[in-house]
Amino acid sequence: MRKDDPCIGVCQWDGRTGWCLGCGRTVPEIRAWRKMTPYRKAALARELPRRVRQAAVAQVEAEPGRTPSRS
């Protein structure tokens, strides 16, 4: 893991969105990360915390025996 890389070493995927549950990126975004411009990296980095939260909520709601919450 590098200082400028959002990877935290979790690398599990949300099947619905394709986002990594650790960093929030998709596989194509992970592959492209090293070649992205600083502007694109910053824009994506701002989006990642929301993705991680959203994927975590979806994982909890998808647990067997859990009733879906209404928002």
Image: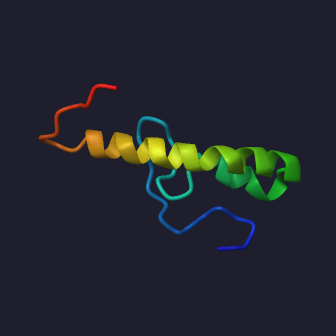
- In the foreground, 11 or 68: 68
- Where, quadrant-wise, is the N terminus in this rendering? bottom right
Tell me if residue 25 can be seen.
no
Q: Which color scheme is applied?
A: rainbow
Residue situated furthest left in the rendering: 65
Tell me if residue 66 can be seen.
yes
Residue situated furthest front in the rendering: 71
Q: How many marks?
A: 0
Which x, y percent locates residue 61? 27, 39
Q: State left or right for residue 24 relative to residue 36.
A: left
Q: Residue at x 22, y 44 (%)?
A: 63
Which x, y percent locates residue 69? 25, 31
Residue situated furthest top in the rendering: 70
Q: Residue at x 42, y 35 (%)?
A: 16
- In the foreground, 28 or 61: 61
- In the foreground, 13 or 52: 52
- Where, quadrant-wise, is the C terminus in this rendering? top left
Which x, y percent locates residue 59? 33, 45
Q: Residue at x 16, y 42 (%)?
A: 64
Q: State left or right for residue 38 relative to residue 59.
A: right
Q: Residue at x 71, y 46 (%)?
A: 44
Q: State left or right for residue 17 relative to residue 25.
A: left
Which x, y percent locates residue 29? 68, 47
